[in-house]
Amino acid sequence: MSASTTPLLIDGAPRHDDQHGLNGHSHVGGRTVRSAPVESHLHPIGSADLAHHPVPSGHEEIWRFTPLRRLRGLHESVPLDGDVTVDVTAPDSVRVSHLTGAEALAIRGISGYLPGDRPAARAWHDAEQTVLVDVPPGLEFTEPVAISVHGDSIQAATATHLVVRLGAQAQATVTVSQTGSVTLVDTTEIVVGEGARLTFVAMGEWADDAVQLAYHHVKVGRDATVKHVSLAFGGDLVRVAATAAYDGPGGDIDLLGLYFADAGQHLEHRLFVDHAVPHCRSRALYKGALQGKSARTVWIGDVLIRKAAEGTDTYEMNRNLVLTAGARADSVPNLEIETGEIVGAGHASATGRFDDEQLFYLLSRGIPAEVAKRLVVRGFFGEVLQRIGVGPIVDHAAEIIERELAITGM
Amino acid sequence: MATLQIRDLHVSVITDEAPIEILRGVDLTISSNETHAIMGPNGSGKSTLAYSLAGHPKYRVTRGSVTLDGEDVLGMTVDARARAGLFLAMQYPVEVPGVSTSNFLRTAATAVRGSAPPVRTWVKEVKTAMTDLDIDPEFAERSVNEGFSGGEKKRHEILQLSLLKPKIAILDETDSGLDVDALRVVAEGVNRYKTQSAEGEGVGIMLITHYTRILRYIHPDRVHVFAGGRIVESGGPDLADELESSGYVRFVGAPAAAL
């Protein structure tokens, strides 16, 4: 770097870290927007009844960032009768069932999940089977339960339903690897029993033509610890809605995510943590990078602390690294707090190019500019990778990131 | 023997509006085995001097020259200045999430020394340097400066000083925010490096401070009073004694904060 005077942060949004007492605000492309204190989308009421979910126009709060015309009718009425292959590799004592018919329907909603929008409601009824992964109470597994989801065509749209259930005091890691070409609505319900510990990783490595609407709901048991990870790299349009609620005090969830959007890709994450139970903790850390024309990412981080949820401790952070011109990242953290009796609630969100102070620090130690940039960029992702803690997944994600960075010559 | 020569240095800070001139003609020569204390009230431009010498993009040199052993420092990139032998211990060291301290130190040492230090001697070297500065070895695996306390950050700066072995070291308010114990550890670290380097080429130190406290531990050969963006008086160590008793009043015309 020469003694250039151009600030390297191109977005108007300053690095922003703050703690909130009572009301939330959000940051949209550098502007600060008050979140509405009443009747906000932070009080979603789900329903399995399709009649409650009219076809969206795109102006709805929950759809306004998503290009509906690229959904191939998933939000309308296109039949969900296609095929994807779901394989589960699990240790012997983990019970894996492929439920169909009345059995499959009966288990839907076991996590407390109810569809919050039309594609979700359609998938609820149309998914042909439910894959149930059942980890018995008290058992601990170090070997992950490996689920692979693969599609060969985008022609026929498909819906899948997966249930992951950990009994009390169980410990497990579940990975879902997603590859190939699909037009898919997939629902994953995760039920984590009392004192259980789960790491759940969804790795999205779709082909360029894939369209996916994913709905993950986690019920965090009393004193349970959950790490939920979403890695989104592939696909034409991927939208992941991850929601969490607590079933008793002492629950703890980490929501981690990484995404890397190339030219034309739309990668969207919508988080919602519903704190309705006292003394629970939530953390969200999502980082994304964008490169190429019309690369697009959206991150919505909604946290609701209800009146009963005294002693809540929550913090969410989203950072986006814009590597080339012509890409756009939206980042909207929303925090709504109905009780003042909390441990902490805050959020941070920033979008920009390299952090110029970090770069200066490394340069001032003699590290050449190219090496310093590499360090800062890898450090950017490394902060999330370090926390995932599942070796093969971390290595694989790091490889994908290297491939992505090579595109911009980083 | 190295010499840093600053001549008639004028520097402006880049702001959203017009640039603002901060340094108004700084003249200073620092050679190996000399310690120069730059003392002055807040806002006098001391830190601007430090950051301009390191090449921070926020500052623009509008007049004057800086040379290190005759080489034009101002024409060098930030990293080239460091490789030429300049080191800036920052007042507010920057957190670099996701980059481990051990990786950072090794990358920096490789750049400054011109080749990667052999692993075995390097590990020992880092360990010894960390022990000398009372730094928990566990820090090596943490991200650079992330979650470090103020005192830990300052010790980490001096750790880099001892590993990167510069010819000229600029210590920008390294004493600020330190309690007496931490100040002593940091000062001992600086003195250790002074002694070690004196066996070789030696180090020239520019010690920027607001307070005389650190001068009890790191003894200056020369003391310069900085006010209004330049050096207004220079003297021996006794000048610091005068500042200790009378403050900066004589130089800025109004009572400054107590020393």
Image (spheres, coloured by chain):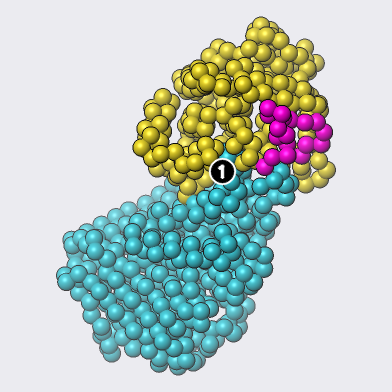
> What residue is shown at x 50% (from left), y 38% (from top)?
B109
Q: Is residue A361 visible?
A: no
Q: Nearer the viewer, residue A42 or A196?
A: A196
B52 sits to left or right of A262: right
Q: Nearer the viewer, residue A226 or A231?
A: A231
> What residue is shown at x 59% (from left), y 27% (from top)?
B167
Kindly identify which chain the residue marked by label 1 belongs to. A
Q: Nearer the viewer, residue A144 or A168?
A: A144
Image colour for chain A is: cyan
The chain coloured yellow is B
Residue A246 x, y percent position in the rendering: 36, 62
Rendering quarter of residue A214: bottom left
Residue A377 x, y percent position in the rendering: 54, 55
- The correct choice, above or below, for B133 with respect to A342 in the image is above
> What residue is shown at x 64% (from left), y 36% (from top)?
B81
Secondary structure mostly seen in magenta is strand
Residue A375 x, y percent position in the rendering: 52, 50
The stretch of residues the image draws in magenta is B60-77
> What residue is shown at x 25% (from left), y 74% (from top)?
A89
Name the residue that disc number 1 marks: A367
